[in-house]
Image (spheres, rainbow, N blue to C red):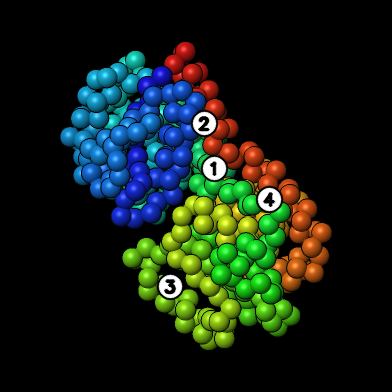
Amino acid sequence: MRVLMVCPSYPPQDATCGVGDYTRCLAEELVRQGEDVVVLTSDRYRGSTEGPVRIMPTFRRWTWGAAMRLAKLSTSPRADVIHFQYTPELYGRGMGMVLAPLLLRIQARHAAVVVTFHTLIGGGFRSKLMAPYLLAAAHHSIAANEEVTALIHHRLPMLRRRVSEIPIGANIPVVSVTPGASKDTLRASLKLPLKGPIMVHFGLIYPGKGLETLLEALASIRRVHPEARLVVVGDTRAENRLYRETLLDLAARLDVTPAIIWTGSRTGEEVSRFLQAADIFVVPYDGGVSIRRGSLLAGLAQGLPVVSTYPVVPSAYLRDGDNISLVPARNSHALAERIVSLLAQPDDALCLGKAAAALAERFTWPVIARETRDLYDRLLRR
């Protein structure tokens, strides 16, 4: 089947975007499974337009005119599925996203219109109006995480039958380490310390990731393990560089600056190696852990023991003490205690890591793409 995927932030672009990375991984896997995929994105796209996934950098602003043009593109050549990726801020304040699903249902009646909700509503009143409208306008919607599913079931129960939950996957590959190579060998190749425990944090650096809590916990951990190190793997967007400076200032006040390694932006393969070189993966989100967090899924996939914070919405996937270890958010004392406990009980940490890797099998791209294709097939048979 021919799938027209719509995502303004498809990579590479000037700014890193988790939704864009998700779309790339899904589109590439759909092609591997035999589908024909074309991605419509913004004219800020910076990559090749040719390849297994064809890219059409088409729109600067998502206006009414853009919606009309999208309707024409969906019929020549004919698309079987038109699949939008959605967050409240992804399409700006243009009205194109308001018009597009309904217009497509009128002008491209042969096609199934699908919307994936990565976030249901934002801070503004406009997004609260958009969510029920899009859920009603699309033939079917996908909730990319448990929070979106819970919000729809709670606030829009009349539309719950029009929604399926298909979680996101990790956009970081699991790189195979040379057979027989020790963790010390891997650390040496990355110029990491050979002595002492290493904790790793991965993801874009911005407020809400719990990095302040993690730095405070590091200071406490080093009283028990003076050689402990924290590796922070991830990029910083331009708008968050001042925030990163506040983290550096906090590290200096806590006297942990020498114990922190900031890697900056790295390739997926490099990220995998940094994670595998660590003892514990720590992501103490201020807003609680969630399967919508691609950074969490990266840690699970590498088979690391993961320490995070209690979720706001109870998770059917994450089980404290089984495949993840959870502490209260913004509590550096509890975080430090849990990490020190895991370092003192390597067998427990190993079991936690094995269970994390087993859970990660649920979030692989072949599984996600198969579930997405099954949904497409059901809609096209309607």
> Which one is closest to the eye, mark 3 or mark 4?
4
Give the CA distance from mark 2 to mark 1. Answer: 10 Å
Amino acid type of disc 3?
A: Arg
Residue matched to label 4: 179
**Disc 1 to disc 3, C-alpha distance:** 27 Å
Left or right of 163 in this view: 104: left
Question: Which of disc 2 and disc 3 is earlier in sequence?
Answer: 3
On the image, numbered disc 3 is attached to which residue? 244
Q: Earlier in the sequence, mark 2 or mark 1?
A: 1
Q: Position of residue 205 (x, y in %)?
A: 46, 64
**Dot 1: few (<14), some (14–19), or many (≥20) neighbours within 10 Å?**
many
Q: Amino acid at mark 1?
A: Gly
**Label 3 with label 2: CB-CB less than 8 Å:** no
Indicate the amino acid at tag 4: Pro
Foreground tag (4 vs 2): 4
The mark nearer the N terminus, 4 or 2, is 4
Can residue 36 be seen at all in this image of the molecule? Answer: yes
